[in-house]
């Protein structure tokens, strides 16, 4: 016992040993985790504008069972904060912000929602928390997976379109400042599909919210994309003869591979350069009896419409591109279902026509395009190439898209990238934007291609260290094991086989211009 403790023991002579220990513990400085724990529990009294903290609790390290979804394991201890944000009288935006109680990396990350939103993304919150981030997710102002919330509630539609993501960023940063007594030094956003659309909204509307943004399979042109998806459904449901049954998908897919697979120097079951592919589904038109190995003439015409996209009847210009060769195995959800994909179906049912019983076969571009444009007003379709304020403050945008995407035509991302080059110039785009096209990957993941990769790490290195990303190594996992790896190349480069070595190893490919 040192002299200080000895003097303290003398001064309290007559007190029991237990009381002495209690006094010494009371005088010991709190650890940072102790401080954060205390701060966490007091956040319910935090005063915020248009927001109310409804829960602030300490979650110990280990397991956590969210209100919805599977149990999450191996979590560090964190402060779980729930908020309700009400920027309008009809708003009811639910948010959760998760804050590490130790080893915070000083950064903030918000994650996006797919399709029509409607739920907190707990798994994504956990992933970021494990990397040391303060995290946030929102239900975008409603619950559920369809757009029925929008009927008669224009403010809720605005919340979904862009306001909820922005408000979540603002309010979460206030919570971060309250618990850590410091603002995040950098802020990131990551989302795919509908989350990619949210990413574009942030970059275009609120360039100050985030320093780096990841937009996967960005559904940024929701209105025109919806016309295209309904056109697909119409093409295969005009009558019984036009429907392409799923048992014919393998033959159609193999025909596309036969035409275009080897363009990157190797036949590997992936089409890496579909824009150079000129596949005609008439190549497998039945010459005799109908079978699973061929398409009838009406089915050939339907397939051509699926690949073609839709055009503006007033100008003849393409409104939205079609599906790419290589996507055929996943057509069931867009052309084989009784109704169009829910994302597009709901837009017309609940937003444009506000009729839950709307018949998609009645949609007509000539009659309805202008009406739909007036209703959307760009709020659900953040398609502007003007991102100068974002890049001027050092913002970095990383996009990725699967060439085999069955829901959002991948060429839409290429088209947006090219429009950025026209608006900003090649040099500025090269300094601020990357696009990675993934051969064989479906919508956000899945498919035959290498769909497992980390875009956050290269974005961090780019924004924080000035190291611009080049290739990103992606893997295909089958039955828990790596089947093969492949470099993802910054567009317009593509991965070409070097000519030697295993085609299952990324090191045997090189990124180069086509």
Image (cartoon, rainbow, N blue to C red):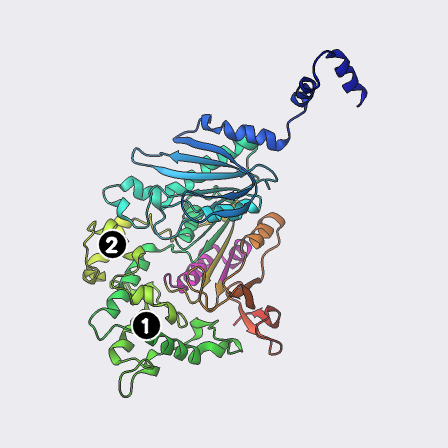
Which of 481 and 275 lies nearest the eye of the viewer? 481
Residue 138 on the magenta segment: no
Q: What segment is highlighted magenta in the picture?
A: 407-436
Residue 276, percent from left and from top? 44, 74
Which label lies toward us, 1 or 2? 1
260 vs 168: above or below = below
Question: Looking at the image, which residue is at 69% across and 21% down?
Answer: 21
Which of 103 and 300 lies nearest the eye of the viewer? 103
Question: Looking at the image, which residue is at 27% across and 53% down?
Answer: 346
SS under mark 2: helix
Residue 414 on the magenta segment: yes
User: Disc 2 marks which residue?
Assistant: 348
363 vs 29: above or below = below
In the rendering, which numbered label is found on residue 246?
A: 1
Q: Quadrant of residue 311?
A: bottom left
Residue 371, percent from left and from top? 22, 53
Residue at the far right: name it.
3
Residue 334, percent from left and from top? 31, 64
Q: Residues within 10 Å of mark 2 (few under 14, many from 20)?
A: many
SS under mark 1: helix
Residue 475, percent from left and from top? 54, 64
Q: From mark 1 to mark 2, how far is it between C-alphas?
A: 26 Å
Q: Is residue 425 visible?
A: yes
Which of 344 and 482 lies nearest the eye of the viewer? 482
Question: Looking at the image, which residue is at 25% across and 61% down?
Answer: 339
Of callouts 1 and 2, the N-terminal one: 1
In the rendering, which numbered label is found on residue 350?
A: none
- Main SS of the magenta part reads helix
Q: Quadrant of residue 474?
A: bottom right
């Amino acid at each position: 016992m040192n002299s200080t403790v000895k003097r303290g023991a003398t001064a309290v002579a007559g007190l029991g040993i237990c009381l002495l220990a209690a006094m010494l513990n009371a005088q010991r400085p709190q650890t940072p985790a102790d401080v954060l724990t205390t701060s966490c529990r007091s956040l319910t009294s935090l005063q915020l504008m248009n927001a109310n903290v409804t829960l602030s609790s300490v979650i110990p390290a280990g397991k956590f069972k969210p209100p919805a979804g599977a149990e999450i394991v191996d979590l560090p201890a964190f402060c779980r904060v729930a908020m309700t944000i009400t920027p309008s009288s009809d708003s009811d935006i639910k948010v959760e912000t998760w804050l590490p109680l130790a080893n915070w990396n000083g950064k903030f990350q918000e994650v996006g929602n797919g399709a029509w939103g409607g739920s907190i993304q707990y798994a994504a919150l956990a992933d970021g928390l494990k990397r040391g981030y303060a995290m946030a997710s929102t239900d975008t102002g409603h619950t559920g997976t369809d757009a029925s919330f929008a009927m008669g509630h224009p403010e809720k539609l605005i919340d979904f379109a862009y306001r909820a993501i922005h408000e979540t960023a603002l309010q979460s940063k206030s919570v971060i400042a309250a618990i850590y007594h410091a603002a995040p030094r950098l802020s990131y956003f990551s989302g795919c599909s509908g989350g990619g659309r949210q990413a574009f909204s942030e970059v275009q509307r609120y360039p100050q919210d985030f320093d780096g943004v990841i937009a996967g399979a960005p559904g940024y042109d929701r209105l025109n994309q919806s016309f295209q998806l309904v056109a697909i459904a119409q093409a295969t449901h005009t009558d019984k003869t036009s429907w392409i049954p799923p048992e014919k998908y393998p033959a159609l897919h193999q025909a596309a591979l036969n035409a275009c697979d080897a363009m990157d120097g190797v036949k590997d079951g992936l089409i890496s350069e579909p824009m150079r592919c000129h596949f005609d589904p008439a190549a497998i038109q039945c010459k005799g009896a109908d079978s699973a190995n061929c398409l009838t003439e009406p089915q050939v015409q339907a397939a051509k419409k699926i690949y073609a996209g839709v055009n503006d009847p007033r100008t003849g210009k393409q409104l939205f591109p079609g599906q790419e060769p290589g996507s055929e195995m996943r057509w069931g959800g867009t052309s084989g279902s009784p109704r169009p994909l829910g994302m597009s179906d709901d837009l017309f049912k609940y937003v444009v026509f506000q009729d839950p019983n709307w018949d998609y076969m009645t949609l007509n571009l000539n009659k309805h395009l202008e009406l739909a444009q007036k209703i959307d007003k760009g709020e659900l379709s953040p398609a502007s190439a003007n991102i100068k304020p974002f890049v001027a403050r050092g913002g970095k945008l990383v996009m990725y898209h699967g060439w085999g995407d069955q829901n959002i035509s991948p060429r839409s991302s290429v088209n947006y990238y090219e429009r950025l080059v026209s608006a900003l110039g090649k040099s500025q785009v090269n300094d601020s934007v990357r696009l990675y096209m993934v051969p064989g990957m479906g919508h956000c993941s899945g498919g035959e291609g290498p769909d497992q990769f980390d875009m956050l790490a290269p974005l961090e290195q780019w924004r924080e260290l000035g190291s611009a990303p080049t290739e990103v190594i992606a893997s295909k996992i089958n039955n828990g094991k790596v089947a093969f790896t492949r470099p993802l190349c910054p567009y317009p480069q593509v991965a070409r086989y070097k000519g030697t070595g295993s085609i299952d190893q990324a090191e045997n490919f090189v990124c180069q211009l086509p």
